[in-house]
Image (cartoon, rainbow, N blue to C red):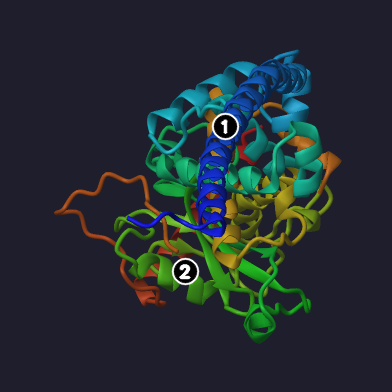
């Protein structure tokens, strides 16, 4: 066998050295990658360990703010969320029971509810809520909508069940109207809509608003609320839509609501006499009614004024109703409904705290909480009739005669 040449042996030896060198370089690279992975793992561990006390610090700092504005005193709590501490706690329990509001890893139920009700009460922008509650805009928006939906979910518990004025009533406002369930009227709430929808939402005062139908009981609690109609819609049209809905306004035959002169005087809806003095400012000790129609209008105005006072109180208590918000129109309608339901909740839990003072200081169809007897006849249309006109005339005559007899007996 022939011996390899010197050049060939050098090439083979060099190839062998290169192979060994490449082998050791690959081992060094693998060791380097291994240490990089170990260092990265240790770095992540150090970051998580260092952030844990920081997260706990932020959580307790946020709880300090809730403690300061909610649980510190009833007066501060009323200023912030329009209810005292015990009422707020009961509201949290009721909303949590719906399953739509629950505590998360980063936020408890009371903070979610406090944040949402605070927005309704003061109409503060998200950046201000972000600074106060130290939450992101997405978190604020998400929990605000969840709380709104939870409040609307319990509307069946919060809406007042209507009760007719009894025959033995002694209330000076309502004792004249036996069988009356309450009063109703419409009010405009300013909203923001897209440019194409503005003509439909423009009112006679050239404002962009939605027409809200409100029905209240004798003690200033909402029985039925229908937000969402355009501001250009007439009150009578909104009322006709309310009684025609599946879960709309229920008016049993033989009972009625007090309405103003803008509505039709028909069965179930008692309007004042037109062409006669009506408003409370028209009456005084020197200017007493001289006819049955005037006396009827005076007492009608006194009782129906309940719904006007209720709308004034509602807009005074919830700042978000006094100016248009930037939420979509669907969310704005839910906001109106939620404010009405929270008003009922406050009345039920706290009574009418400072109602008169609040009025002086400031200025979709929904479930009707009525238990309907399937055999009970309901009012389904609004149209004038001779029977209802005679009923109003006889009622006015009896009221006037009773009042004159009472005055003569003194």
Q: Which of marks 2 and 1 is in front?
A: 1
Q: Identify the residue shown where x is 59% and y is 44%.
A: 144
| Real-space Cα separation, disc 2 to disc 1, in angstroms | 71 Å
Residue 192, position in %: x, y? 70, 69
Badge 2: residue crowd in 10 Å (few <14, some 14–19, many ≥20): many
Residue 155, position in %: x, y? 43, 43
Q: Relative to residue 156, is residue 90 depicted above or below?
A: above
Residue 20, position in %: x, y? 52, 40
Q: Relative to residue 265, is residue 23 depicted above or below?
A: above
Mark 2 or mark 1: whose residue is earlier in sequence: 1
| Tag 1 secondary structure | helix
User: Considering depth in this image, is 206 or 184 the residue closer to the camera?
Assistant: 206
Badge 1: residue crowd in 10 Å (few <14, some 14–19, many ≥20): few
Q: Relative to residue 192, is residue 117 depicted above or below?
A: above
Q: Residue 163's image quarter? A: top left
Residue placed under numbered mark 2 in the picture? 239
Residue placed under numbered mark 1 in the picture? 37
| Residue 266 relative to residue 320: left or right | left
Examine the rendering and report whether any part of residue 275 can be seen: yes
User: Considering depth in this image, is 57 or 46 the residue closer to the camera?
Assistant: 46
| Residue 120 relative to residue 6: left or right | right
Q: How many marks?
A: 2
User: Considering depth in this image, is 143 or 341 the residue closer to the camera?
Assistant: 143
Q: Residue 350's image quarter? A: top right
Q: Identify the residue shown where x is 49% and y is 41%.
A: 151
Q: Where's the C terminus, which quadrant? A: top right
Residue 54's label in the rendered image is none
- Disc 2 and disc 1 in contact, CB within 8 angstroms: no
Q: Identify the residue shown where x is 42% and y is 61%.
A: 365
Q: Identify the residue shown where x is 51% and y is 29%.
A: 104
Farthest left residue? 375
């Amino acid at each position: 066998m022939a011996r390899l040449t010197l050049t060939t042996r050098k090439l083979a030896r060099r190839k062998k050295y290169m192979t060994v060198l490449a082998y050791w370089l690959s081992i060094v690279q693998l060791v380097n990658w291994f240490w990089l992975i170990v260092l990265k793992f240790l770095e992540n561990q150090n970051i998580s360990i260092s952030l844990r006390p920081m997260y706990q610090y932020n959580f307790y700092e946020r709880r300090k703010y809730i403690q300061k504005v909610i649980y510190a005193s009833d007066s501060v709590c009323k200023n912030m969320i329009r209810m005292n501490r015990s009422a707020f706690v009961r509201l949290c329990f009721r909303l949590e029971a719906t399953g739509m509001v629950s505590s998360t890893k980063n936020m408890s139920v009371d903070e979610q509810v406090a944040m949402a009700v605070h927005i309704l009460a003061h109409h503060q922008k998200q950046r201000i809520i972000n600074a106060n509650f130290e939450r992101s805009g997405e978190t604020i928006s998400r929990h605000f909508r969840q709380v709104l939906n939870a409040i609307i979910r319990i509307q069946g518990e919060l809406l007042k069940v209507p009760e007719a004025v009894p025959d033995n009533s002694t209330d000076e406002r309502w004792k004249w109207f036996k069988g009356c369930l309450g009063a109703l009227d419409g009010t405009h709430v300013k909203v923001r809509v897209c440019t194409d929808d503005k003509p439909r939402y423009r009112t006679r005062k050239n404002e962009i608003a939605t027409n809200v139908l409100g029905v209240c009981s004798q003690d200033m609690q909402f029985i039925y609320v229908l937000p969402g109609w355009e501001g250009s819609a007439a009150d009578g049209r909104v009322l006709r839509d309310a009684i025609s809905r599946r879960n709309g306004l229920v008016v049993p035959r033989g009972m009625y609501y007090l309405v103003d002169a803008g509505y039709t005087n028909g069965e179930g809806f008692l309007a004042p006499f037109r062409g006669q003095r009506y408003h409370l400012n028209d009456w005084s000790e020197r200017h007493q009614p001289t006819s049955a129609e005037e006396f009827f209008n005076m007492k009608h105005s006194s009782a129906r004024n309940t719904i006007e006072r209720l709308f004034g109180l509602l807009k005074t208590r919830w700042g978000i109703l006094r100016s248009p918000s930037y939420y979509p129109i669907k969310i704005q309608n839910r906001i109106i409904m939620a404010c009405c339901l929270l008003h009922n909740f406050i009345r039920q839990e706290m009574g009418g705290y400072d109602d008169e003072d609040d009025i002086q200081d400031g200025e979709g169809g929904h479930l009707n909480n009525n238990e309907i007897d399937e055999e009970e006849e309901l009012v389904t249309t609004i149209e004038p009739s001779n029977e209802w006109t005679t009923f109003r005339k006889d009622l006015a005559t009896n009221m006037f005669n009773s009042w004159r007899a009472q005055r003569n007996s003194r």
